[in-house]
Amino acid sequence: MKRIAIAVAAALITTATPAVLAQAYPSKPVRIINPLAAGGNVDIVARGIAEQLTKSLGHQVLVENRPGASALIGTRYVKGQPADGYTILAIANTFARVPAIITDPGYDPLKDFTGVSQTCDIPMVLVINPALPVKTVKEFIALAKRRPGELTYGTAGAGGTGHVAAEMFAQQAGIKMMHVPYKGNAPATTDLVGGQIMLMFDQVSTSAGYIKAGRLRGLAVTSKKRSPLFPEMPTVDEAGVKGFEDTTFNGLVAPAGTPREILEKLRAEVVKAVAVPALRERFDRNGIPLVASNSLDEYNAFIRRHVEDFAKLAKTAGIKAN
């Protein structure tokens, strides 16, 4: 009887462990690893969220930068950490896309990680050098059809957000353009302003100053809704390429196997964080709308869709890593 009682007690403890862990979580600082450069959107959004999570969770939430190799260094690092909710990864579109264009990325976004929540959804903008004689998306498409393969677009590299948006746009609009990859967004923007290239798909948050100063011309934004920074500017869909949408998302994921109760607790705290008026206003001013996922399942399906859709696009468009 004594052995049976011990076995039953052990079974009850094992069954209750995830709930107990979630109630006690966190009991020490939590790290958010940013696998991209400091000062970028992933970094500043992660730090804004961490600031609020520190207040709500009662333990410090730190952002640690581990950039390099198209985010592979930081991503692989988090993959190898314990699945206990104390080391999570800040991600952007590259997380879902890199495995489709690199032979051995060292991680599988669907098998090695599980979602916590999306944190923001940043529209891009189709920007051109003002010397290009067009003022609307329809005029731009007409020009591109008259000059197939001649219009040059710059990107921060193959497979990046600007490259993918341009390829999607070209396919849906039925045009051909010439890709000019750069080693980063800044040199590409410099050449666009200088007239060495003709267009880019760039994040609204980084192009806004050039557009407002008249140094670049914005034709349309890539989101479903218009950007608060440029309410007069149409979306690409409104401008004639029906159904077009491509935005830059940020989010948080954890190593696969992290208890669902801990993931749900983190997701619920992200929901609270992005609802803080002061935080939302701070990011809205920079063209970065904060969002949170309604459920873990919704966010994991969101990531899966991005992985699968990009793999198809990469194959069709021949997108490969630089």
Image: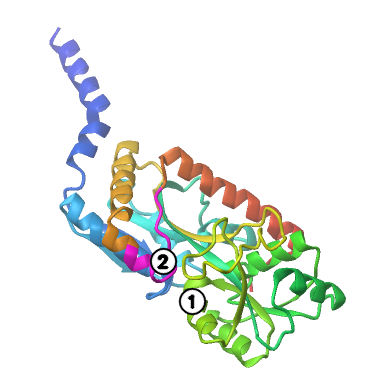
Check disc 2 and report the residue beneath it. 42
- Which is nearer the N-term, disc 2 or disc 1? 2
Q: Quadrant of residue 20?
A: top left
Question: Mark 2: which secondary structure?
Answer: helix
Left/right of residue 54 with respect to residue 181 in the rendered view? left
- Residue 25, position in %: x, y? 21, 44
What colour scheme does the image use? Answer: rainbow
The residue furthest right is 146
Say if 108 sits above or below 156 in the image: above
Front residue of 222 and 257: 222
Left/right of residue 266 with respect to residue 297 in the rendered view? left
Residue under the point 30% across and 59% down: 49
- Residue 10, position in %: x, y? 20, 22
Left/right of residue 62 with respect to residue 174 in the rendered view? left
Q: Quadrant of the C terminus?
A: bottom right
Q: Which residues are magenta?
A: 281-292
Say if 292 sits above or below 239 in the image: above
Residue under the point 80% across and 81% down: 150
Q: Is residue 290 magenta?
A: yes
Check disc 1 and report the residue beneath it. 206
Question: Mark 1: which secondary structure?
Answer: helix
Q: Looking at numbered disc 2 in the image, what kind of residue is underneath it?
A: Val
